Amino acid sequence: MATLYTQQDSNVRKTWFLMTLFLVFIIGLGWFFSYSFNDPIILYFAIIFSILMNITSYWYSDKIALKMSGAVPADEKQFSDLHNIVENLSITAGLPKPKVYIINDLSPNAFATGRNAKNSAVAVTTGLLGILDRSELEGVIAHELSHIGNKDILISTIVVVLVGFVALLSDMFLRMSLHGGKGSDSNNKGRAIILLIGVILAILAPIATTLIQLAISRKREFLADASGALLTRYPEGLASALQKISANPNQLQKVSKATAHMFIANPFKGKNVSNLFMTHPPVEDRVKALLGNV
């Protein structure tokens, strides 16, 4: 059975692989456009951009994710129960207490972020606090602490930055390609082929990053559910919380495709999306797994 630290080494490897893949992909994309436009500056820009984005995603992705979600530090007096739950479960899990944030939103949801256990944060919505009892809230917090313990918060947070910037870069390249490039007639055919390849890569970039989100998110949610249940020794609490979150009709106000995979449950409500393209496993499957009915 999965434990709190089962996938630590695997997630560290995935993180470095993802950052390396991003580096190579952006430089390769920059080369295609540099060649097609006969402008080496584009390649230099791609190299600098990819390096800066890797540095930014490692050191600042958690702050970016919190800012994008509208999270603010949770006052210890106003949210004393929440702080107590986070502190007690952190001690049980053998983790330093993460920073606690609040998102003023009626939609019940939560996520964890940070580059490591010492620099981590847990954010919950006011809507979540409003509908869950203590045991259910403990289940949700245990789930988020499991993400921290499993060391998958870094890779999930990095994806926020990389997905956003790859989509931005792809859009920029597509706009550039619409204007075309000037050159000699003898070179136009070759450049047109290279340009076509570059445009295809730019179109596929957001799709590739979405597939990365799906591959990371669906597996890690099941593991965090199991690890959280082991932490509280009361899987019914998390199962009940997931059911309440899923049944609530409110959709998060500040959410995007770049941050959706971070939350404990799908933040997009009322959308008919195929399970294949959802960033979270169906709640019914997660509840069955928690209650041992699979």
Image: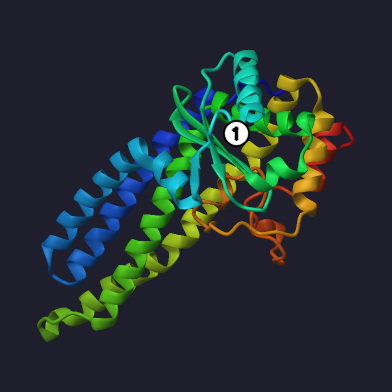
Please state if 60 lies on the left or on the right of 126 as rendered: left
- Furthest-bottom residue in view? 185
Name the residue nearer the viewer: 271 or 206. Answer: 271
Measuring 19% from the left and 49% from the top, which residue is drawn there? 48
Name the residue nearer the viewer: 17 or 66. Answer: 66
Amino acid type for the residue under numbered disc 1:
Gln
The picture quadrant where one finds residue 110 is: top right
Measuring 65% from the left and 42% from the top, which residue is drawn there? 264
The picture quadrant where one finds residue 143 is: top right
Q: Disc 1 on helix, strand or loop?
A: loop
Horizontal and vertical percent for residue 63? 40, 41
Tag 1: Cα neighbours inside 10 Å, few (<14), some, or many (≥20)? few
Asked if residue 239 is positioned above or below residue 251 in the image, the reply reads: above
**Residue designated by label 1:** 78
Horizontal and vertical percent for residue 273? 69, 64
Q: Quadrant of the C terminus?
A: top right
Measuring 62% from the left and 37% from the top, which residue is drawn there? 220
Task: Examine the rendering and report whether any part of residue 103 can be seen.
Answer: yes
Measuring 36% from the left and 37% from the top, which residue is drawn there? 58
Horizontal and vertical percent for residue 212? 51, 49
Asked if residue 11 is positioned above or below residue 66 in the image, the reply reads: above
Q: Quadrant of the N terminus?
A: top right
Horizontal and vertical percent for residue 255? 54, 56
- Furthest-front residue in view? 77
- Furthest-right residue in view? 293
Name the residue nearer the viewer: 191 or 268. Answer: 268
Please state if 191 lies on the left or on the right of 78 as rendered: left
Please state if 45 lies on the left or on the right of 99 as rendered: left
Asked if residue 192 is positioned above or below residue 62 in the image, the reply reads: below
Asked if residue 220 is positioned above or below residue 263 in the image, the reply reads: above
